[in-house]
Amino acid sequence: MEPKLAERFKKRLLQTREEIIGQLRQRDGSAQEIGQNGIQDIGDESVIIYNRHLLMSLSENERAKLIEVDEALDRIENGSFGMCEECEEPIALKRLEVMPNARYCVRCKEELEKVSEESP
Ligand SMILES: [Zn+2]
């Protein structure tokens, strides 16, 4: 994927991330407090603790979404963004536009869903 394009998806993913965390901050004042204290003397460890607290306060859906967004950001960093994890073919741009955190191309996604429907 072109770096410029990847950069655009990165911005969108970071925006989505901020939205999820922003909603949480509005709901849970204590998360904000911890964030502010943590930032004063921040080491990697406090970031991890902060994130863990954050993750605990999220609903199942929000947490899953946040993890997906983070994974997509990781893939942008390591250059594998936009590639299907199953067949390693590029995922259609249209699909990524709608769902920047997509991990599979349409074909593999359908295959995987078929499998999970068949299993008990
Ligand atoms: Zn695929």
Image (spheres, rainbow, N blue to C red):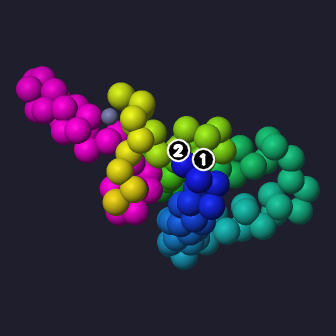
Is 44 situated above or below 37?
above
State which quarter of the image contains the C terminus.
top left
Circle 1 residue: 76
Name the image quarter holding residue 17.
Answer: bottom right
User: Residue, x 44% and y 51% (percent of image)?
Assistant: 101
Dot 1 or dot 2, earlier in sequence: 1
Report which residue position mark 2 lands on. Answer: 81
User: In this rendering, is residue 117 above or below 77?
Assistant: above
Give the image location of residue 43, x and y in percent. Answer: 86, 47
Q: Of the residues shown, which amino acid type is indicated by label 2?
A: Phe
Q: Residue flagged by tag 1: what amino acid is it?
A: Ile
Query: Residue at the spot x=71%, y=67% of the render?
Result: 33
Residue 36 included in the magenta stretch of the image: no
Image coordinates for residue 32, horizontal then vertical, percent: 67, 68
For the residue pair 73 and 8, the one nearer the viewer reads as: 8
Q: Secondary structure at mark 1?
A: helix
Task: From the viewer's perspective, tell me whether residue 49 is left or right of residue 29.
Answer: right
Image point 26% across, 34% down: which residue?
A: 108
By secondary structure, the bulk of the magenta-drawn segment is best described as: helix
Quadrant assignment for ligand 1: top left
User: Magenta segment, which residues?
Assistant: 95-120
